[in-house]
């Protein structure tokens, strides 16, 4: 009970966004929304009204997805004793824009969704957290993992909603989140995958196949519970395979 | 023999030049060529800002490699407009970061 009260207090104090974070989030959301609505500005000819409508829809989808992803990391960070700060990644955003323009809608869904990464700040006044006395790689990996996990939960929620009410917007949101989750799990700094990978290779070997397999099963309309169980099994099998074939030979213990 | 730590500038100059040619060839119209080069200029500006107080020349050479590659590969658009847009993009991005209007992570 005391931990819950402590978490509630931490959320109240540290969850809010700084002005730089807000600026970065706004830029990221608009750039990514533009990328995912790039080929929706008219069918045969350019249509401004249709384009703006699709851009608005895309902004809603992207904002929801990025905020859910970020919320997972912020909440887990606070539980672990860190304040998470969102940082936009201009190189990634500009590369994604260049790719969108160069592709020009020729290859559908070639969306490079790389809004940014995060930085951790140690909550010195709350040193009784799980990871005490400093920031460590594994703690960072766990915080990074919370983002794709929340995105996966959002995909499941959207899939359940789409069973009762099918709409283009929900379908697009599911597609967007699937691509967002897979890209964010790639081990490219500053994406979440890189933090998980450098935090713990074993964790990465489990998480990557399990989450991708779960997403594929959910997208192809497999039952949600079965998808999660099967993906867990796939994750364990590949984790063991990785351990036996590689990690067992190179692991020399903590230094 | 090729030694990476001695010749990394030439290596990346070549790689980025090829990348510039491919990007330029994929642009379907002059307008899109201009937008792409403006965005590439912004990336260059960010990179130069990153090296504000460090060694710059190899980075400027690598950036010039991209521009040269782009100019070789570009099919649509005027060469001078492309060069000017690249410089404007670079200056804009550098100013945005230098005046602390934007902040981000490099990696």
Image: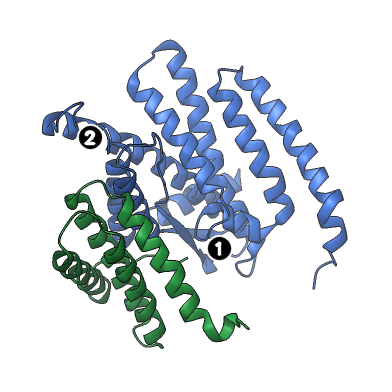
Q: Colour of chain A?
A: blue
At a point 17% along the width and 57% down the height, the residue shown is: B77
Q: Are marks 1 and 2 on the same chain?
A: yes
Q: Quadrant of the C terminus of chain A?
A: bottom right
Q: Quadrant of residue B91?
A: bottom left
Q: Which residue is mark 2?
A: A56
CB-based contact (under 8 Å), mark 1 and mark 2: no
Q: Secondary structure at mark 1?
A: helix
Which sits in the foreground, B76 or B61? B76
- State whether residue B58 is above or below residue B79: below
Relative to A225, does residue A189 appear above or below in the rendering? below
- Residue at figure coordinates x 63%, y 70% from the top left: A133
Q: Chain of mark 2?
A: A
Residue under label 1, please give it: A126
| Mark 1 belongs to chain | A
Q: Nearer the viewer, mark 1 or mark 2?
A: 2
- Mark sitting earlier along the chain (1/2): 2
Toward the top, the furthest residue is A164
Letter of the chain shown green in the rendering: B
Q: Residues within 10 Å of mark 1 (few under 14, many from 20)?
A: some
């Amino acid at each position: 009970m005391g931990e819950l009260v402590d978490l509630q207090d931490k959320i109240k104090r540290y969850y809010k966004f700084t002005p730089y974070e807000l600026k970065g989030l706004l830029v990221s959301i608009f750039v990514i929304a533009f990328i995912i609505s790039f080929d929706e500005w008219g069918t045969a000819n350019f249509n401004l009204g249709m384009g703006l409508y699709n851009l608005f829809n895309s902004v809603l989808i992207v904002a929801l997805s990025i905020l859910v992803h970020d919320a997972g990391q912020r909440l887990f960070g606070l539980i672990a004793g860190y304040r998470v700060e969102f940082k936009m990644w201009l190189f990634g955003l500009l590369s994604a824009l260049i790719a969108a323009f160069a592709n020009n809608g020729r290859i559908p869904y070639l969306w490079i969704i790389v809004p940014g990464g995060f930085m951790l700040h140690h909550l010195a006044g709350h040193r009784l957290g799980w990871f005490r006395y400093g920031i460590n790689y594994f703690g960072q990996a766990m915080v990074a993992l919370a983002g794709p996990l929340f995105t996966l939960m959002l995909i499941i929620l959207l899939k359940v909603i789409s069973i009762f009410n099918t709409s283009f917007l929900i379908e697009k949101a599911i597609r967007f989140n699937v691509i967002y989750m897979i890209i964010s799990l790639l081990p490219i700094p500053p994406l979440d995958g890189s933090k998980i990978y450098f935090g713990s290779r074993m964790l990465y070997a489990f998480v990557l196949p399990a989450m991708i397999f779960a997403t594929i099963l959910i997208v192809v309309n497999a039952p949600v519970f079965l998808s999660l169980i099967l993906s867990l099994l796939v994750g364990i099998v590949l984790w063991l395979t990785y351990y036996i074939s590689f990690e067992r030979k190179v692991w020399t213990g903590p230094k | 023999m090729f030694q990476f730590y001695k010749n990394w500038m030439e290596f990346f100059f070549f790689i980025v030049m090829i990348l510039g040619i491919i990007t330029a060839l994929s642009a379907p119209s002059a307008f899109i060529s201009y937008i792409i080069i403006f965005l590439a200029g912004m990336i260059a500006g960010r990179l130069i800002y990153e090296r504000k107080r460090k060694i710059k020349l190899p980075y400027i050479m690598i950036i010039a490699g991209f521009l040269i590659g782009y100019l070789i590969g570009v099919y649509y658009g005027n060469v001078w407009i492309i060069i000017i847009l690249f410089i404007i993009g670079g200056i804009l991005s550098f100013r945005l970061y230098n005046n602390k209007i934007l902040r981000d992570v490099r990696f």
